[in-house]
Each structure stands twice: as structure tokens, then as C-alpha cells.
Image: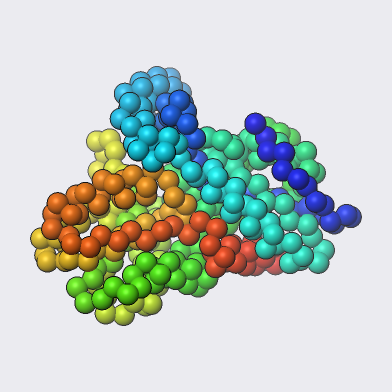
């Protein structure tokens, strides 16, 4: 259903539609299988031979196979993903931050989820209804990857063509070492470790994994993760750190090391305080609330980690919203 949020226009000003792009997540247990089917249907994420014929069947079969245990995970975190609620809060906060920021422009902020609701299609229909004069795509993936940012941007373009919207489109590609983003993320880490001795502490930056063939083909994701971690690390001199990748699936070779494997390695090396930073996530979701908070915590403690700290995601933290505001305004100034 399309959002019916109150609209307060600044009369006579052109309206710029800012679209927050994210993957989305099932909001109920009954939505898990159709969400997974949408995910596995994405030809830019999962590449199959003769995809036009094979992918629909693959998506339906694999979603059915995986839905049972994935539903259990969502049941453990309350029965659904909070990502839509969090992203809507980010959208409202950003719209408020942009109000009056450009004297000759009225900013409207929309949410477009790649695999669930509110969908990119719904965002496009809202923008058409409100008569936006131009559009800015702002992915909530700080680090560019063809499987996430690229897929979401392409989906937005397809939907705009489908709706007959010819408004100019500006694209934010990524912001891995944007000073405001780095400061906001570092602030979250500082809050999480306040009062904990840094002696013997290890920062584990856990990013969402991708098949290695993306990187082999020139995708900048791994390099942007490393740039981001290097920038954040300057805030924590002397604290040891490493990067790992989570959420591995399927038989393809994925970026490594795997987060569970790295955690066990660190425990064996004598690390007692493990601080896990979900580096590629700006909203809480199944990958943070279950994969890290429940499963990784259990693995870490069983391996000998004595103190497990998981840094919260940025959500609608004012510092992060201010960063998104600055990114939008800077992109508008570029023309």
C-alpha cells in the first residue's frame, strides 16, 4: 500500500524527490517466502544460465527450501524485520533536515525497497502523484556493489520508465569515507565501548559478503570497505582490527574471511573483548539482530571470547541524518 503521509508543500517551489534505496525485509512471517523469492529472482544478484527460463523456477524452489529455517530466525527477533520502520524514520528525519535547506527547492523523501514493501514501484508512483521535478537516488548502502547499489539503481530506472517519468535523475553511488559518515559510525563505536578497557580489545568490522566473482570483475565493494575501515580506525589508535564478511550462501566462492571463522581465529589468538561493527549496514535487520546478536555471540562465547560487544547500526542517529543531508545538498550543487 502506498504511504498516505501528510504532505506539506512549500507553495510554488519545484519538488525534488529523494529516494532512499534499500533491500527491505519481510515484515511478517508469512512474507518470508515471497521476500526470498523476490531476492533470488534478481538476475543482478544471482546469475544463472538461461536466466529468463531458469531463474523463476530457481527462485521459487530455493525460497521454499530456505523459508522454514529463515522464518525461525525472524520469529526469534519478533516476527519480522524492522528495516521498513527504521528506513521510514530515516526518511522523515532527512526530510525535516532538508526543509528550508535550499531556498528555491522543496525536498520530498521517499523509501524504495528492492525486494519488499514499501517498494521502489510505490515510491515512483508517489513521486508521480506529487509531481516531482527532479529525482535524487540515495542508496543506504555506504559501499558500492553491483549486487546491492547497482541493482537498486537499475530497478529505480526501470520503474521510472514504466511510470513514464522523465524527470532528471541524479545518483549517489557511495560514501565509504565521507567524513560525516565516518564520524557518525565512529561515534557509535565510541558509545558502545565506553568504559571498556581497550587493552586486549579487537574491533571486528563485519561486512555483508558477496561472491568473489563480483570483485574479480572489477566491483569496488571490497576496496570501499577497506577505505571505510581505514578511515574509522584513525579514531581508535592502538586498537587492533580486522575485516570479515558475513551472510555467505550457496556454493560460489565468497569474499573472506568469514565472520564466524575470523571470530574463532581471534579467540584462539587470545582476544577476550570482541567488538563487532556491522560495517555495511545502516539499519538493524536479520543480519544484525540474529546473525550477529544471537548466532555469532553464541559462537564467540563458545570459542573463548569473554566480552562480546555488538555496535548498533546508525538508524536515524542525528549525526548520520546530517551526513545524508549534506550528501544530498552537495550532489544538488554539482548540477
Task: Report the residue at 30% width, 61% height from top.
Answer: 309
Is residue 40 toward the left or the right of residue 260 in the image?
Answer: right
Q: How is the image coloured?
A: rainbow
Q: Quadrant of the C terminus?
A: bottom right
Residue 300 sits in which quadrant?
bottom left
- Residue 304 visible in this rendered orientation of the protein: yes
Q: Nearer the viewer, residue 125 or 146?
A: 125
Which residue is found at the position 60% from the left and 67% from the top?
Answer: 322
Q: Is residue 101 above or below residue 7?
A: below
Q: Is residue 168 found left or right of 319 in the rendered image?
A: right
Q: Could you say which quadrant of the image residue 189 lies in?
A: bottom left
Of 189 and 44, nearer the camera is 189
Residue 279: give x, y in percent of width and height: 38, 59
Q: Residue, x 37% and y 34% (percent of image)?
A: 75
Furthest toward the bottom, the residue is: 237
- Image position, residue 20 (x, y; %): 59, 50
Q: Residue at x 30, y 30 (%)?
A: 69
Q: Position of residue 168 (x, y in %)?
A: 72, 50
- Tally the marks: 0
Q: Residue furthest right?
A: 12
Q: Is residue 254 something one can see in this rendering?
A: no
Q: Is residue 147 above or below residue 183?
A: above
As displayed, is residue 270 above or below residue 112? below
Q: Quadrant of the N terminus?
A: top right
Residue 86 locus on image (x, y percent): 53, 49
Q: Nearer the viewer, residue 58 or 192?
A: 192
Query: From the viewer's perspective, is 290 left or right of 89?
Result: left
Amino acid at each position: 500500500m502506498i504511504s498516505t503521509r501528510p504532505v506539506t508543500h512549500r507553495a510554488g517551489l519545484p519538488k525534488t524527490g529523494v529516494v532512499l534505496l534499500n533491500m527491505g525485509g519481510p515484515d511478517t512471517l508469512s512474507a518470508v517466502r515471497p521476500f526470498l523469492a523476490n531476492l533470488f529472482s534478481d538476475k543482478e544478484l544471482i546469475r544463472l544460465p538461461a536466466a529468463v527460463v531458469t531463474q523463476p523456477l530457481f527462485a521459487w524452489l530455493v525460497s521454499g527450501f530456505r523459508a522454514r529455517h529463515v522464518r525461525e530466525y525472524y520469529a526469534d527477533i519478533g516476527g519480522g524485520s524492522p528495516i521498513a520502520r527504521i528506513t521510514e524514520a530515516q526518511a522523515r528525519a532527512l526530510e525535516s533536515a532538508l526543509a528550508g535547506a535550499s531556498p528555491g527547492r522543496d525536498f520530498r523523501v521517499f523509501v524504495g525497497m528492492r525486494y519488499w514493501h514499501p517498494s521502489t514501484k510505490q515510491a515512483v508512483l508517489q513521486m508521480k502523484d506529487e509531481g516531482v521535478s527532479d529525482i535524487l537516488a540515495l542508496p543506504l548502502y555506504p559501499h558500492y556493489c553491483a549486487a546491492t547499489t547497482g541493482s537498486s539503481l537499475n530497478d529505480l530506472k526501470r520503474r521510472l520508465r514504466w511510470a513514464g517519468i522523465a524527470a532528471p535523475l541524479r545518483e549517489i553511488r557511495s560514501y565509504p569515507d565521507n567524513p560525516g559518515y565516518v564520524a557518525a559510525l565512529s561515534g557509535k563505536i565510541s558509545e558502545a565501548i565506553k568504559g571498556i578497557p581497550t587493552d586486549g580489545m579487537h574491533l571486528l568490522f563485519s561486512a555483508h559478503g558477496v561472491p568473489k566473482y563480483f570483485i574479480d570483475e572489477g566491483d569496488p565493494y571490497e576496496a570501499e570497505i577497506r577505505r571505510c575501515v581505514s578511515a574509522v580506525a584513525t579514531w581508535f589508535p592502538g586498537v587492533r582490527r580486522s575485516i570479515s564478511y558475513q551472510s555467505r550462501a550457496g556454493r560460489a566462492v565468497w569474499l573472506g574471511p568469514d565472520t564466524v571463522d575470523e571470530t574463532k581465529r581471534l579467540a584462539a589468538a587470545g582476544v577476550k573483548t570482541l567488538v563487532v561493527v556491522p560495517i555495511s549496514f545502516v539499519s538493524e535487520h536479520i543480519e544484525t539482530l540474529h546473525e550477529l546478536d544471537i548466532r555469532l555471540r553464541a559462537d564467540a562465547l563458545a570459542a573463548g571470547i569473554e566480552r562480546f560487544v555488538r555496535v548498533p547500526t546508525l538508524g536515524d542517529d542525528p549525526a548520520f541524518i546530517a551526513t545524508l543531508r549534506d550528501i544530498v545538498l552537495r550532489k544538488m550543487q554539482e548540477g
